[in-house]
Image (spheres, rainbow, N blue to C red):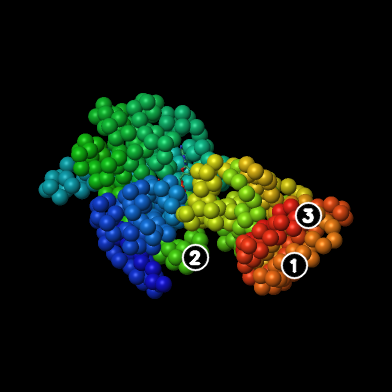
Amino acid sequence: MTYKVLVSDPLADEGIEILRGFCEVDINTGLSEDELIKIIGDYDGLLVRSGTEVTANVIEAAAKLKFIGRAGAGVDNIDTNAATQRGIIVANAPAGNTLAACEHTLAMMASLARKIPQATASVKRGEWKRSAFMGVELNEKTLGIVGFGRIGQELARRAIALDMKVVAYDPYINEERAKELGVEVMTLDQLFPVADFITVHTPLIKETKHLINKKSIAVMKDGVRIINCARGGIINESDLYDAIVAGKVAGAALDVYENEPPKDSKIITLDEVITTPHLGASTVEAQLNVAVSVAKQCIEVLKGGSAKFVVNAPMISPDQQDRIDPYVKLVRNMGSLLIQLVEGRIESVEIEYGGKAAEFGSGSKYITRMALKGILDPILQTPVNIVNAELAAKERGIRVSEVITDKSLGFTNLVTISIKTDKMSETVSGNVSSPEKLRIVKIGEYMTDMTPGGDVVISRHHDVPGVIGHFATIIGKYGVNIAGMQVGRNQPGEEAVMVLNVDSEVPQEAMDKILKIEGVYTAKYAHI
Ligand SMILES: NC(=O)c1ccc[n+]([C@@H]2O[C@H](COP(=O)([O-])OP(=O)(O)OC[C@H]3O[C@@H](n4cnc5c(N)ncnc54)[C@H](O)[C@@H]3O)[C@@H](O)[C@H]2O)c1
Ligand SMILES: O=C(O)[C@H](O)COP(=O)(O)O
């Protein structure tokens, strides 16, 4: 099968070459939403930067789309919720442009301090106004970094090397890391009044929208300088404009804007404001990094695998991936078996991790989603995957819970999936004794040793002579060969569970006859 990928923003050649080694690639940049909607239905993958708005309408029209790759960090131009709903993997290249954005911020800070862009323009106009461009030094000034992630931290190291004092605010800050770097951690209320330069490095989210506004500017130092190389919208441009005009803020350096391009924005008209057209990531090195990263991730996903930096699914490391792969296979099959055993509307799914399986940490979220895939795939129209599994369950009112326990019935690890419907409950437990040896070890109350795959009949019956013989006779009459049989019971003469591995599908007519055998309470054929 030949896959088709659309590249709708400028991407470095190295990434395109990698893609072309695997699939057809069309490069079509500068498309409007309507133009994109018209063509997106043909594509399996879409690679963008910040120039393409991947809206819910685009995603709705993208019938074949499996992957959206962002050659960069911010995914605010992609409707990730709409993508999640459709099971489309969205991935970015978060670290590929960190240094580029950090160095751009430094360049903007120095230019702002020394009015380099204004002075350049003046000289080019034929002027020689040395006193008009008096600057300030960075040395011993306090830099306030809001958002101490990848870029914020790289910037801190460099600013400290310039003998600046660095203070930072981030609600999720790694205090240890900040201390190592020599950065003082502060609240926003503490940071605003002490910083000579304030630079923002957060994503644009509800909590950071207009984080710098009239109120916050009011408590800042007089003559503060403000830099935004993160996202337009973190700063309220109109409030910043007023504060510069009023002389409260000495100047601002902006790489990003509330609207891009900022055609009608009055802020860019001010002499005190220096600007670049969203160039933070625009270095040869960064563009190569991000293009290669998303191209490789796209290929992995189209091959049926996962991507390294998925933004709409739980992240797991490559090491963890190897460890959890056998469990993923086991729980998918257990889920598939369970959904064939139960009747009624599913109310809840509980997944219990016991013994060594309790040590997966964040990996359990991944396994849980794959169990949900096993359960939901057979009953839903839209394919369920690592991205939309939890949402698909939630949309159907299914409560999903994870339980971590040290109990494992004597197995080194044990994963138990329990489904409750409005009619019944059923539970299946499985164990991985080696990556190749996956077993279902318990069904309901009964121990078993079943390979989770193939065709199987599972019954609950009264443990009296004749029932199993009768059962086997019916199956034989329909030409179905029995490959293996196990019976589990707690007490002789009471209820027993039988797992019958068969070599082919058992016709419904045979199952109806089996259900009429005296002493058979339930009998289900399942293909896993
Ligand atoms: N101008 C450009 O071309 C360019 C290039 C690269 C990245 N960026 C943007 O820069 C920003 C930072 O990128 P990064 O790679 O450092 O991201 P990151 O995820 O490594 O760091 C973001 C940090 O913001 C913090 N944060 C979240 N909510 C916050 C809040 N309410 N207040 C303060 N901090 C908060 C997070 O805890 C995190 O540490 C992003 O918006 C990204 O899109 C812009
Ligand atoms: O979030 C990012 O990675 C930057 O904003 C870069 O955007 P760009 O890839 O459009 O230059």
**Residues at circles 3 and 2 in contact by the CB criterion of under 8 Å:** no
Q: Amino acid at mark 2?
A: Gly
Q: Identity of the amino acid at label 1? A: Ala
Q: Which residue is mark 1?
A: 472
| Residue closest to the far left | 126
Q: Is residue 143 above or below residue 7?
A: above
Q: Nearer the viewer, mark 1 or mark 2?
A: 1
- Cβ atoms at labels 3 and 1 below 8 Å apart: no
User: For the N terminus, which image quadrant?
Assistant: bottom left
Tell me the crowding category of disc 1: few under 14, some 14 to 19, or many 20 or more residues within 10 angstroms, Cα based: some
| N-terminal label among 3 and 2 | 2
- Depth order, front residue of 340/103: 340
Label 1, secondary structure: give it: helix
Q: Nearer the viewer, residue 184 or 325?
A: 325
**Whole-percent x, y for residue 34 in the image:** 25, 52
Instruction: Kindly identify which numbered label has been placed on residue 56.
Output: none
Is residue 152 visible to the viewer in this orientation of the structure?
Answer: yes
Which numbered disc covers residue 304?
A: 2
Disc on res. 519: 3
Q: What residue do we see at 74% from left, 68% from top?
A: 473
Asked where in the image residue 510 lies, by quadrant, the reply is bottom right
Label 3 vs 1, first from the N-terminus: 1
